[in-house]
Image (cartoon, rainbow, N blue to C red):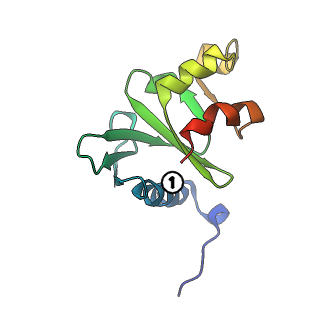
C-alpha cells in the first residue's frame, strides 16, 4: 500500500498539491501553520500563519524563481524548491534586488510581458537568494 510516488509522473495539479504539502511541512519547523486556498486569493496559493499570532504570509507556490508584475504591491511571498532547498522570498523586495543587480533589465519577457523566471539558480542568483533559503 505504501509506495513512494514518482513526482515526474504526477500531473501539474498533483505536483502543486505535492509541493504545497512539502513546503507546509518544512514551514512547520519555523512555527508556521499553512492553510491552502482554493481560489488564488489576492495572488496567494496559501496563507502561512505563525505561532506568534501576528505574522501572516500570503504565499504563491512556484516551480522556480519567478518575478511577475501581477504580484507587485500585493505583499506576496513566493516559494519554490531547488536541489534540496526551499526558498521563500518577499516578491517586491527580490524584484528590486534583481533589477538593481541587472537581472531582467531590457529583456522582452520583463519589459513587454511583465514577468521573468529562471529554470535554475545560477551561482550569482544562488548568492542573491541564499538569505531566503529555509
In the image as oriented, which residue stretches furthest toward the bottom? 1
Q: Position of residue 22 (x, y in %)?
A: 50, 59
In the rendered view, tell whether residue 51 sits above or below residue 106: below
Residue 43 visible in the displayed image: yes
Q: Looking at the picture, tell me which residue is in the foreground, 52 or 91.
A: 52
Residue 52 in the image, given as x and y percentages of width and height: 26, 46
Q: Residue at x 44, y 36 (%)?
A: 77
From the viewer's side, name the closer residue of 84 and 18: 84
Q: Residue at x 53, y 48 (%)?
A: 134
User: Residue placed at 30% from the left, 40% from the top?
Assistant: 55
Residue beneath the point at 67% across and 17% down: 101
Residue 123 in which image quadrant: top right
Crowding at mark 1 (Cα within 10 Å: few <14, some 14-19, many 20+): some
The reply, left or right, for residue 41 in relation to residue 24 is left
Q: Is residue 126 above or below residue 75?
A: below
Residue farthest to the left, as pictured: 53
> Is residue 105 or residue 27 the one in the foreground?
27
In front: 124, or 2? 124
Total marks shown come to: 1
Q: Is residue 39 left or right of residue 94?
A: left
Query: In this orientation, does residue 114 appear?
Result: no
Mark 1 element type: helix
Q: Could you say where residue 4 lies in the image, as x and y percent from the top left?
A: 60, 76
Q: Which residue position is annotated with label 1?
A: 16
Amino acid at each position: 500500500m505504501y509506495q513512494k510516488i514518482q513526482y515526474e509522473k504526477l500531473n501539474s495539479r498533483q505536483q502543486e498539491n505535492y509541493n504545497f504539502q512539502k513546503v507546509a511541512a518544512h514551514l512547520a519547523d519555523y512555527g508556521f501553520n499553512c492553510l491552502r486556498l482554493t481560489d488564488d486569493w489576492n495572488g496567494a496559493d496559501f496563507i502561512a500563519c505563525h505561532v506568534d499570532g501576528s505574522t501572516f504570509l500570503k504565499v504563491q507556490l512556484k516551480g522556480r524563481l519567478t518575478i511577475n508584475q501581477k504580484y507587485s504591491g500585493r505583499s506576496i511571498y513566493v516559494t519554490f524548491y531547488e536541489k534540496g532547498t526551499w526558498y521563500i522570498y518577499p516578491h517586491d523586495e527580490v524584484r528590486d534586488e534583481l533589477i538593481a543587480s541587472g537581472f531582467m533589465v531590457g529583456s522582452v519577457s520583463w519589459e513587454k510581458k511583465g514577468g521573468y523566471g529562471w529554470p535554475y539558480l545560477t551561482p550569482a542568483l544562488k548568492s542573491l537568494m541564499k538569505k531566503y533559503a529555509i
